[in-house]
Amino acid sequence: MGWTMTLKDDFGVSAWTRHSGNFLSLLLLFLSLFSIPAHSDIVLPKAHHFSWKAGSWGQCIGEVCGSGGFQTRTIWCIHMEGWTTHHSHCQHVEKPESKRQCFKVCDWHQDLFEWEISDWGDCVLVPFFSNELKVRTAECVTAQHGIQRRNIHCVRTSNRSTVSIRICEFFSQKPPVEQACLIPCPQDCVVSDFTSWSSCSKTCSAGLQHRTRHVLAAPMYGGANCPNLTETRTCTNSVDCPVAEDEYQYSLKVGAWSKCRLPHNKDSLLNGRTTVNFGVSSNENNSITLHTLDPHPQFRHHQYHHRQHALVHIRYPMSWEVEVGYQTRHVRCARNDGKNVMLSLCTKDNSPLTFQACVMPKDCQTSDWSSWSSCSKTCRSTDLSPGYRVRTRVMTQIPHGGGKQCPALEEKEACNIIGDLLPKCPRYTWRTADWGECHIRPLLGQQDRRRANISKLCGGGVQTRKTYCVQVPDDSAAHYRKEVSRPVNAWLCDGDDPPLAVQNCSIPCQYRCLLSQWSPWSACLHENCKEPQGKKGFRQRKREVLWESSNTLGTCPHLMEFIPCEDPACYLWQIQQKEKCIPTNSSCGPGTAEQNVTCVNTEGGDVPATHCVDDPPPTEEACEVACSADCVVGSWSSWSFCSHSCATKTAEGKQSRTRTVLAIPGKDGKACPAAPALEEWRVCNDHPCNVFYWEASEWGLCTEDTSAKINESSSWNGTSSCPVGVQTRNVSCMKMNAGPVINKRCLDSSRPETNQPCSLPCKKDCVVTPFSEWTACPTSCLPDNSTAAMQSRYRIIIQTAANGGQECPDTVYEERECDSVRVCPMYRWRIHKWHSCTLVPDSVRRGLSGSGEACGNGLETRGISCAGEDGEPANMTECLQWAGPFPSQIRECRVPCKDDCTLTAWSKFSECAGCGSSRTRRRSLVGRSKKKEQCLNEDWYPLEENETCPCNQFLSQPFGNWSACILPNPPVFKSLQGWMRHREVKECGQGLRYRAVACIDQRGHLINPTLCTDSGYIVEVCHIPCPLDCKLSEWSSWSACSSSCGSGLKTRSKWLREKAFNGGRPCPKLDLKNQVYEAVPCNRECGQYEWRIEPWSICTINTVDDLPACGEGVQSRKIRCVMKGAASGEEGSADVSLCDQEEIPPRAQVCHLACPNDCVVAAWGAWSHCPLQCGPGSARNRSRHILRLPASEKAACPELVQSEPCLLNSTCFTYQYRVSDWSTCQLSESAICGQGSRSRLLDCVRSDGKTVELQKCQQFGLINKLQLLESCVVDCPVSCILADWSPWADCSHTCGTQGHSVRTRRILQEAHEEGRPCPNQLTQTKPCSIRPCYLWLLNDWSPCTVEGAKCGEGVRRRNLSCVVHWGNLHESPPPQPVDRALCGDVLRQHLQQEMEQPCFVPCPGDCHLTEWSTWSSCQLTCLEGRSFESTGRQARSRAVIIQAMENQGSCPHQVFETQPCKGGKCHTYQWKTGGWTNNKRAVWCQRSDGVNVTGGCFPQKRPTTLRHCHPPCTKPFSHCTPSGVCGCEKGYTEVMTSHGFLDYCTRTPGVDINKKADVKTNSGRLKPRPSQANDLFSEWTLRPVGPDGRVKLWVYAVTIVGFIVILFIITLSFLICKPSKTSKASPPPQKPLTLAYDGDVDM
């Protein structure tokens, strides 16, 4: 089920149709809803008194939306007086229905209609809705309440047609139609203060003088009108007018010229007459008036109609013709009392000019409007600013003779204001090309470039890429592998920062590895201990890679070495512990000792016994416990160092061990073994000296792997990827110091890999952008002889070809000539001959002046037409556009009269004597003119003319400063290659600098500079000094290691030789000595040499007589200083000073050889370990065991256990790791910057500060967590990289000396570290050639001149003059007048300006208006200090001047006018008052800017100007004092009533008041007056002196009371201050305790 909607525009009805077969569609949707009228009353008369009244229909109610709804309304029966009654009083048959069917509106219907709301109208006062504002009676404080309305309609959304308002009310409430608003209070007219009074109109007797004021603000919002702007008063001169002087003055007064009209046909009769009226009632009396009738009105109408008809067919005229007519004016003689008198009283001899020839007015005519241009806003942008479109029309007829001026020739209107239907505006963004190759050369300084081998440089560098602006593609466009868009102008992307165009990169350096020390040689092992085979094995040692470079090229040296050996064993039986020997039969003698046997691997770890293939040693071993008389031999010593590190053909390694006799045998005891039995030798290091290792070459190039290619093709999933390859290397077994040998000599299981997978370089095709759009060709036409305009386009390579990809095209820049540029058409003015001089027609002349001679001033005209290049006639509009200034068509002429002065024609100009001279031409009077007085006046008729000779010599004058030195630009094509070339653009060298030249002619006028120089410049070669980089010395030799023992640093340095100049590379950070350092770790072996000891000699005992050789003795040994780790046979003794003298072992010691039957103990074992922290109270022990018990039980054995305390740095030591300082970041020798490494060394330090072997710390379980090697980066010295210079901009001024052209460049990469800094000059300025500035200068209006009369209607004129200046009118030299042709079309300029204005010169006695005042300052309408509107108003006015009181009745009304203005201010007005003087003061209104005004201040708040006393001062000799009470005049004393009011004034005795005695009324009683001193108290409220001059009684009382109070104070003071007499025994007086203790001791 669905609904369809049909809109019927002709009926304004909408209907919905339901798609179902059994439901008829509704014909009208809201016919039942809205067919009734808007009012609800339906009156159906039953009788004359009762009628039905129906209410409004209610809302449509229904279960579902559609036609099944119903609505109801209320029905009343009402009486004619308005009260409701029962229904039975009304006729039932005529009762309106109260229920009907309706269409219930659905929610989705509201999308079809909406409210259309207009803007709010003007605010109108509440009681008055018309435009007439009435003054409010109530006082307005801030603003008046008003109301404003707007129009609201319900419209269809589809076509905006209007429907009933009730449709929209179903969906939403109707918006308010009116709202309250505020209207500012009525603002009265505000005028300025009056000017000073004018001088008296007469110099004798009585006259008039006036003063005026002008309007500052016009009345608004019902404010009071402006008061009179003029005040007039009479003035009297002390000098009386002479009796003989005429009382009246007479002035010739002319009226305005009539409209120009064509003369009648010569055969037509003059139907008119000239009359002179001497009446006094009319202002036009005594004027000459020509009455004419038009004899052919129908002909004129037909002629006009014919012209209009012709304009339809000939759209633009082909020529212009000018018609000459005539005009007349009224002339009368005015007396200074305003009356007209006979004309002869004014004219004397010469009759006034009442006619003249004139040009018939022709209105400006224009063509029809062109069609509208396309809208400037063509797309929907984020801002809401509308676009605009323009249409133009051309002038087809220039105005003549005061015809209508041309209307606007261009019209602009907004378009696409909202722009919802427009496509979205294109967005622009930056794109980048691929990064270029990595280059290191830009990082090199001048000093490094001379030394470095560029081809071997590696490490950090820089690479660049091109940035360009493109239009963002539409989201719906397909995206390709690499997005390629057409480049556009970069300024379109100016809103965003361009992406980085420079980045760091690196070129791999030679492979570097940092390796650990070799491990000790392992035992002889099988190649594979899990599967042992054969009787040959290998001994091996290893080292580890501590750090390696990230370069993929190259490998580290070998990490494992091998030595072949015989009888390898991966697992061995080891006797872990031997138990005590237990004799078999007795306490001594032979016995057995048990021993613990385990199977261990080569590292000493226990493994299952099954791993050891040989038979295990026996668990019991035969031993012997010495009896008391047996010889006791000690245990074997450890094996000595091997004599050779490996076995050769001539030598093999041996080592020995010894044991000593501890006790000699007794009688019958077992004898000691022979001396050879006390020493054992064995072969050691019997492996040959041949060391083998695997050597791997560098990996080869990545080649295609055919097997991988097959696999890839079989499993390809549709995504392209770079092919997988393989690279190989050679691996061979090498013999140390010999060369390659067969591979069997090396351990095969540790052989390095010979193959590894790799990625083949991807095949890359060249990718270029499409060509940019062709640059725009000139839109205007070009002259015929100009050079052809060119346009260009370019494209950008964003990916270069690589690995066999498609190469880039050869052409990335194209240039061509513009095809569409048209050549300017050639049109010229065709000038016709001048017609004869046209005068006013004879009939007009005779009728007005009575003169019959056809002579005098007239007008000449000529026609002009337009001709094309081929001479064919063309439309005048073409010449207006292309032919330059149009020639004049009118000029004044004169037909000589018989009384005119006659002169010869001008002679030719005399020859010029050279530049700066002048030439002359002459003429002379002819005939009777030589004797006429007026002809001899050379001011009127000059007989000689001089003019300056033309001069072609010009002065070239340099002007302004030199420009900066400008280097030549690279060609445009090269600059498009990406700015990888920017490094090669030199910033120094030879350039050019420019200085503008002013070209001046002989008169000092500025002229075209090409007349002096070809280019308008002085060009000079200049040089920009090249930058010099900072120079350092070579590296010094390495210093000694900073540590005498252990790890330290050694350094070398460079020092400063030359500082940087002219923006060269700065020096690196130098220390105070101007040096820079490099530090590397070093290590001085603390134990390079060690003490090597030999076995102790036999214990030598000094025997006495034949006693047995036992007891204490001495034994010795040899010690040597040898290199650590040297074999005993290869060691060689070194100087003993090289070994640690503190640890020198003893060369001799006391020994003890036990006697028979003595107790024999073994040598002391090693001391046990102290705790790691060597804590207090800890101890260490050592022990020994009994080898032979004593024969006697009473004999005791020596102690078997010894203990001593653990003392720090004596018997106990702690150990810790210590690292050296970091080295500086170490790079490859061929690198300047980039990735490197820094290192430090590790030492093991004993608690007493001695550096020991690292194994010591390891033995104590210390774990090194300190990092000894880390990567580091040396920042690259990136020099500043700049973009290309922009093209030179247009000159800032087209003429004058202020013009300059600018070009700029931007920084693409700031300098970093020691890179060359960016130059300060990112903007270059070049002066423009100094061209003369020609300007039309509009002169001031001339005074009002009346031609041929003293007063009346005249004209004021102003002239256009062409001046040349140097670009600034207000600076020297001032503008100088030149030929008007240099400024352009004079006539066209005249058409654009008002050159004449009518004016009026008042006659003596005339009542007239003043000139317009200047515009007042811009004032805003403000409400409580805030602007009520954005546009202000300013006013000006004309006041009325009365020259004769008799003429008051003919005075015009004063006028004012306003105009809108911008930049106005809010003004407030405030009453100001002056000081009181004789109970009067000045009160005036002042504006907030300090201007005194009339109006603006509230009259109700005006302060009083007079001060009054209440009650009034009516007593004789009284007056109102400034304090507002009545007082007496000087010389009188006030006598007051009991209520404080003045009773009367009495004369003060001794004061002379004779002058006023006869003035005052005699109603007052003159009583004797006190002294003049009473005046002193006249202003007091309580006066001490009475009206009779006596002191009042209360004054005496106050004096007595005051005296008593003073006496009391003196007595009290004496009693308090008198010292008290106290006895010695009495305690000191206690100070009273205050309630607030302040902590003072004296409280």
Image (cartoon, rainbow, N blue to C red):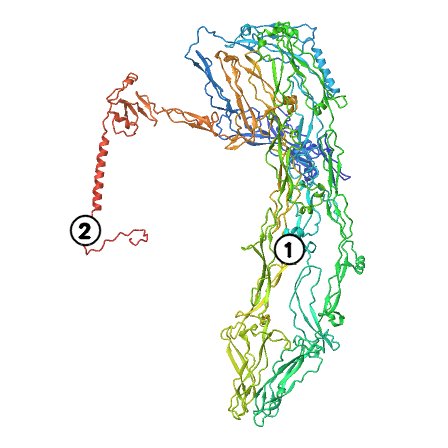
Query: Could you say which is closer to the camera, residue 966 or residue 1492?
Result: 966
Quadrant (top left, top right, bottom left, bottom right) of the N terminus: top right
Q: Position of residue 901 (x, y in %)?
A: 61, 8
Determine which quarter of the picture holds residue 1596. top left
Q: Look at the numbered disc 2 and give the secondary structure of its residue.
A: loop
Query: Could you say which is closer to the camera, residue 736 or residue 1564?
Result: 736
Distance in Å between CA atoms under marks 2 and 1: 105 Å
Q: As drawn, which residue projects farthest toward the bottom?
A: 668
857 lies above or below 618: above
Q: Amino acid at mark 1?
A: Cys
As drawn, is 1547 to the left or to the right of 532? left
Residue identified by numbered label 1? 1233
Q: Residues within 10 Å of mark 1 (few under 14, many from 20)?
A: many
Q: Amino acid at mark 2?
A: Lys
Query: Could you say which is closer to the camera, residue 1464 or residue 1606?
Result: 1464
Q: How many marks?
A: 2
Marked residue nearer the N-terminal end (2 or 1): 1
Q: Position of residue 1353 (x, y in %)?
A: 57, 14
Residue identified by numbered label 2? 1621
Q: Residues within 10 Å of mark 2 (few under 14, many from 20)?
A: few
Foreground mark, 2 or 1, reads: 1
Q: Position of residue 393 (x, y in %)?
A: 69, 25
As drawn, is 111 to the left or to the right of 1160? right
Q: Position of residue 738 (x, y in %)?
A: 73, 70
For residue 453, say whether it is visible. Answer: yes
Query: Could you say which is closer to the camera, residue 1459 or residue 1236?
Result: 1236
For residue 1265, say whether it is visible. Answer: no
Q: Look at the numbered disc 1 and give the secondary structure of its residue.
A: loop
Q: Which mark is residue 745?
A: none
As drawn, is 716 to the left or to the right of 996? right
Determine which quarter of the picture holds residue 1298. top right
